[in-house]
């Protein structure tokens, strides 16, 4: 007689088994199940400018539907290079120094796979966007963490300079910098960036910068690491159009760097996606070439949304860290969750979603030790005003 069927093996490779399902997918699924207002995943609940969508439709009708060059359509690569020169004063060759990718997420994966050898160390600031650590693992690298700690006096997140210095050594290959920073909303200062640049030069380290929120800065200024002394040839700058033009589903990103760094990115990119949707690249080129007042209007919209939600959360008892950039708010929930007998961020976010009807992200997923994020919760305010008002109305149930 045949024996009992064997249990299926765990087929997930070891390099991914520690990560499970991304927290964004988990919370969005939970929000859908409980009909909760989704302030967890960072996507707008409104569409980007109609004229950009029209440009994509026009590109399809004009026959731009076949494979473009793996580095990107010449039109988009040139638009990115021209915008880079206008913003930084630095010239780049669009054919040799710009690579169009399927969103910044693919650019990150291609960068790590192309640059990092097994055993190389990568310095990550935590809390971090969750794909960073997975990308390091895919490349066989070793992550070294430098924590951004909440400063009660400054109302923002800061890192200790000595801790950063100690993270660099002879095995360090890459430092990854995300500014403006998700999830804290921090915009790194010139002093902080200068220290990072000095350490990169001193230890011959490559910098990979994730600058997808480059245009969403409310306080201070966005500083590009590549413009600091000694950094132009050792910085790979990554970005995308999704956040700037509220078209996150298009997944059009790019990497800008020296010809040598670009060669490393393309070595991986050609075997990941090879290329990115051609008509969307044509539309992205049109948007970057002539954004009109769309970015200014979006920034004003988000500033109002930030101020509204920050004030509402503070009124409910949260300790809010007002973001200088991005479209996320980090808040300490302990004064609100404590009376409910809730211990950590994951339990609190589940309670918010299932009982209050508002979904948020538990930031413990963004720390090497999840307990370090246990007192925080992250809200996304890239939503219509009526969505935020409805969420705040539901949150009133948290009042004692």
Image: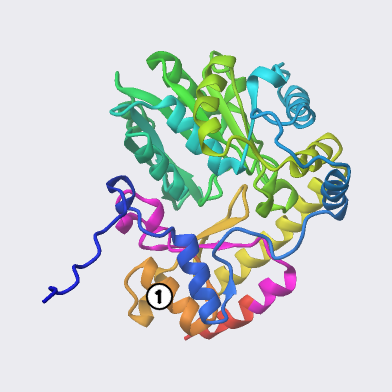
For label 1, the crowd category at 10 Å Cα-Cα, with few meaning under 14, some 14 to 19 and many 20 or more, is: many
193 or 128: nearer the viewer? 128
Q: Which residue is drawn at 33% across and 80% down?
A: 341
- Whether residue 178 is visible, yes or no, is no
Magenta-highlighted residues: 361-390
- Is 267 on the left or on the right of 70, as rendered? left
In the image, 94 versus 334, the foreground residue is 94
Q: In which quarter of the image is the N terminus?
A: bottom left
Res 70 quadrant in image = top right
The residue that disc 1 covers is 337
In this picture, residue 199 sits left or right of residue 186: left
Colour scheme in use: rainbow
The percent coordinates of residue 213 (x first, y second) are 63, 44
Q: Tell me what residue is drawn at x 44 percent, y 61 percent.
A: 23
Can residue 120 be seen here? The reply is yes
- Which of the 4 quarters of the picture holds residue 95? top right
Residue at x-position 67% and y-position 71%: 388
In this picture, is 224 found above or below 374? above
In the rendered image, residue 77, in percent from the top left (x then y), is placed at 73, 28
93 sits to left or right of 268: right
């Amino acid at each position: 007689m045949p024996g009992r069927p064997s249990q299926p093996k765990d087929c997930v490779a070891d390099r991914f088994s520690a990560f499970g399902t991304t927290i964004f997918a988990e919370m969005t699924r939970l929000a859908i199940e409980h009909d909760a207002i989704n302030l967890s995943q960072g996507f707008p609940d409104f569409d980007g400018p109609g004229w950009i969508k029209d440009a994509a439709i026009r590109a399809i009708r004009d026959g731009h539907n076949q494979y473009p060059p793996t580095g990107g359509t010449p039109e988009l690569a040139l638009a990115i290079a021209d915008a880079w020169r206008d913003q930084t004063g630095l010239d780049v060759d669009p054919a040799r120094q710009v690579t169009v990718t399927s969103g910044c997420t693919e650019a990150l994966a291609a960068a790590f796979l192309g640059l990092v050898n097994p055993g190389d160390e990568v310095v990550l600031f935590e809390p971090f966007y969750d794909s960073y650590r997975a990308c390091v693992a895919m490349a066989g690298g070793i992550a070294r963490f430098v924590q951004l700690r909440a400063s009660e006096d400054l109302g923002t997140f800061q890192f200790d300079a000595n801790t950063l210095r100690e993270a660099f050594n002879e095995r360090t290959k890459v430092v990854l910098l995300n500014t403006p920073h998700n999830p804290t909303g921090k915009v790194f200062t010139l002093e902080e960036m200068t220290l990072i640049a000095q350490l990169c030069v001193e230890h011959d380290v490559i910098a990979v910068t994730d600058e997808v929120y480059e245009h969403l800065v409310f306080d201070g200024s966005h500083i590009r690491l590549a413009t600091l002394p000694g950094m132009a040839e050792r910085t790979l700058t990554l970005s995308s159009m999704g956040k700037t033009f509220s078209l996150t589903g298009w997944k059009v990103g790019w990497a800008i760097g020296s010809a040598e760094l670009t060669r490393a990115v393309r070595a991986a990119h050609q075997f990941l996606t090879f290329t990115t949707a051609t008509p969307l690249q044509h539309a992205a080129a049109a948007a970057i070439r002539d954004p009109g007042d769309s970015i200014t209007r979006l920034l004003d919209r988000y500033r109002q949304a930030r101020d509204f939600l920050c004030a509402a959360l503070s009124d409910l008892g949260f300790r809010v860290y007002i973001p200088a950039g991005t479209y996320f708010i980090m808040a300490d929930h302990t004064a609100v969750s404590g009376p409910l007998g809730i211990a950590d961020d994951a339990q609190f976010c589940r309670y918010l979603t299932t009982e209050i009807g508002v979904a948020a992200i538990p930031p413990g997923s963004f720390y090497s030790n999840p307990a370090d994020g246990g007192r925080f919760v992250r809200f996304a305010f890239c939503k219509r005003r009526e969505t935020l008002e409805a969420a705040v109305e539901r949150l009133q149930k948290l009042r004692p």
